[in-house]
Image (cartoon, grey):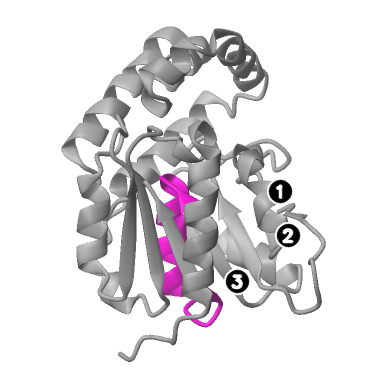
Amino acid sequence: MKLSLSPPPFEGAPVVVLIAGLGGSGSYWLPQFAALEKEYQVVCYDQRGTGNNPDTLPEGYSLAQMADELAQALTDAGILRYTVVGHALGALVGLQLAIDKPDAVSALVCINGWLTLNAHTRRCFDVRERLLHSGGAQAWVEAQPLFLYPADWMAARAPRLEAEEALALAHFQGKTNLLRRLSALKKADFRRHTARIRCPVHIVCSADDMLVPAVCSSELQAAIPHSHSVVMRQGGHACNVTEPDTFNTLLLNGLASLLHSPEPVL
């Protein structure tokens, strides 16, 4: 699997691995690159079956496979220790990595993630899945901003949304791949496994997320004793895109705190 690595800003710079959500594109993190690259070697990637890593995902594709694929690619690149920053599905992959590869993951940032799928989030994905079946990629792509962005932010950026839709259609990952990734997302349940997470965890959520309610992050924090959280007042599900200045400050402060905190005593 192909990875994109920024040059380390100095010798021995810590590595930060960025994992996007269901869309799978490494370019999702574009608003964070400049801020992070000053202090970290940044790794991003298009997830298997998307963008620069085209493939047909196998039936029964799972979070464990997603995590293992990334861990192997990082090992192949000579990266053996890293901090993970994951958004939504990417946060779940981060949790899986922290459980499966505890010696590799030094810290974890979960953005609008969850322990197990919230009833509201499940309803949203069920509706989106029906849209995909009835209206194809066009319907899926046109509906996506409604779940990602605040209404006023969208209303002020109609040309941008049109351009995003065109790009998303041109690079659509395919119905089969999307459904298999969505199935893996729906099945994820970390309620019995969080005690195995040894690294420090920073949790970020947005109070106005219309896809993943902020209570999901509260539940995640309660389940991971050595974690702390911060709530953005606004920004929607894609808060790192809509409020990048606020988000980047929270992310940089969170990373600094995580990487200078002692290992939890278990």
Residue drawn at point x = 78 percent, y = 57 percent:
6
Rendered image quadrant of residue 13: bottom right
Q: Amino acid at mark 1?
A: Ala
Cβ–Cβ under 8 Å for marks 1 and 3: no
In the displayed structure image, the side of residue 82 where residue 123 appears, left or right? left
Q: Position of residue 128 (x, y in %)?
A: 35, 21
Tell me the distance, in whole angstroms, between the alpha carbons under discs 3 and 2. 16 Å
> Is there a contact, CB below 8 Å, between mark 1 and mark 2?
yes
- The quadrant in which the N terminus is found is bottom right
> The magenta stretch spans which residues?
86-106
| Mark 2: amino acid | Lys
Would you place residue 181 above or below residue 131 in this image?
below
The structure residue drawn at horizontal position 45% and vertical position 37%, both measured from the top left corner, is: 239
Q: Residue 152 got which mark? A: none
Residue 70, percent across and down?
60, 60
Q: CA distance from mark 1 to mark 3?
A: 19 Å
Q: Residue shown at 37%/17% (left/top)?
A: 151
The residue pinned by badge 2 equals 38
Name which of mark 1 and mark 3 comes first in the sequence.
1
Q: Which residue is mark 1?
A: 34
Crowding at dot 3, Cα within 10 Å, few <14 / some 14-19 / many 20+, comes out as: many
Give the number of the disc on residue 82.
3
Q: Position of residue 33 (x, y in %)?
A: 68, 48
Does residue 102 belong to the magenta stretch?
Answer: yes
Q: Nearer the viewer, residue 258 or 66?
A: 258
* Kind of element beneath mark 2: loop
Q: Quadrant of residue 119?
A: top left
Location of residue 259 in the rendering, given as x and y in whole percent from the top left corner: 53, 76
